[in-house]
Amino acid sequence: MHACTRVRFVALGFVALSALALLAEPAAATDKVIRGDSSGFVDDAEVCGLTVDISYTTTFRATVHEWVIGPDDPPADNVWLGNINEHGSATLTNVANGKSVLRTWNDNIKEDSLVDVGDGNWEYTYAVNGFPSRLGGRPIGVGRIVITQTLHLGDLADESDDYFVGEVASFDAGRHPDFSSDASFCDALIAAIG
């Protein structure tokens, strides 16, 4: 995945990799519901060749179905699988001209598996269902997509050695141009605030 897309997904709320980081909180049993709200501001982010300020708000709800690593065994890389709903909005403002655009999303994620493939690497498979992500009211991604990411978790007792390796879409029943290229998102962003 392109670096610009990764930054967009993490900074603007889409994200399975971010969800893994949020889920380090241990739980005693499966089918536990985890809820959270967050908001924040990213100053002078470089997105699609533009310097933008990003103000975002997200609501996160997840149901833990199965612990894959942990809880607390070892404590650093606790990972569970379940169902996740995250929705939110982000306002991107071009620092150079003050123009702004609103991005909205409502992601329903069904996590499928996290498998140890050796050498500290794990394959994480999940599906994102249906609802459109919009930029300035215009859909930029819609439909169901199944993604397998390779994550390096290394030493499970040390989160500092974790990093994203890559990903592939094994199924795409919709329009997800941002998965393989930054072009459509960047074209829409530049048209709106460039």
Image: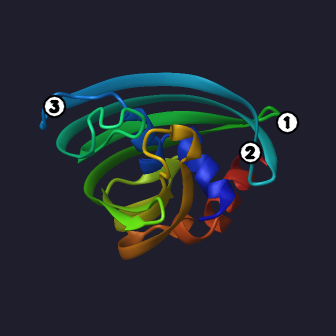
Q: Position of residue 10 (x, y in %)?
A: 55, 44
Answer above or below: position of 175 versus 94: below
Q: Which residue is mark 3?
A: 32
Looking at the image, the residue that sits furthest to the right is: 96
Residue drawn at (27%, 54%), measured in percent from left and top? 111
Residue drawn at (39%, 23%), measured in percent from left and top? 37
Q: Position of residue 153 (x, y in %)?
A: 47, 51
- State left or right for residue 185 relative to residue 118: right
Closer to viewer: mark 1 or mark 3: 3
Answer above or below: position of 138 versus 69: below
Closer to viewer: mark 2 or mark 3: 3
Residue contact at pointers 2 and 1, CB within 8 angstroms: yes
Q: Earlier in the sequence, mark 1 or mark 3?
A: 3
Q: Amino acid at mark 3?
A: Lys
Q: Earlier in the sequence, mark 2 or mark 3?
A: 3
Q: Amino acid at mark 1?
A: Asn
- The quadrant holding residue 191 is bottom right
Q: Residues within 10 Å of mark 2 (few under 14, many from 20)?
A: some
Q: Which residue is mark 2?
A: 193
Q: Position of residue 113 (x, y in %)?
A: 27, 60
Disc number at residue 97? Answer: 1
Residue contact at pointers 2 and 3, CB within 8 angstroms: no
Distance from the alpha carbon under mark 2 to that under mark 3 = 42 Å
Q: Amino acid at mark 2?
A: Ile
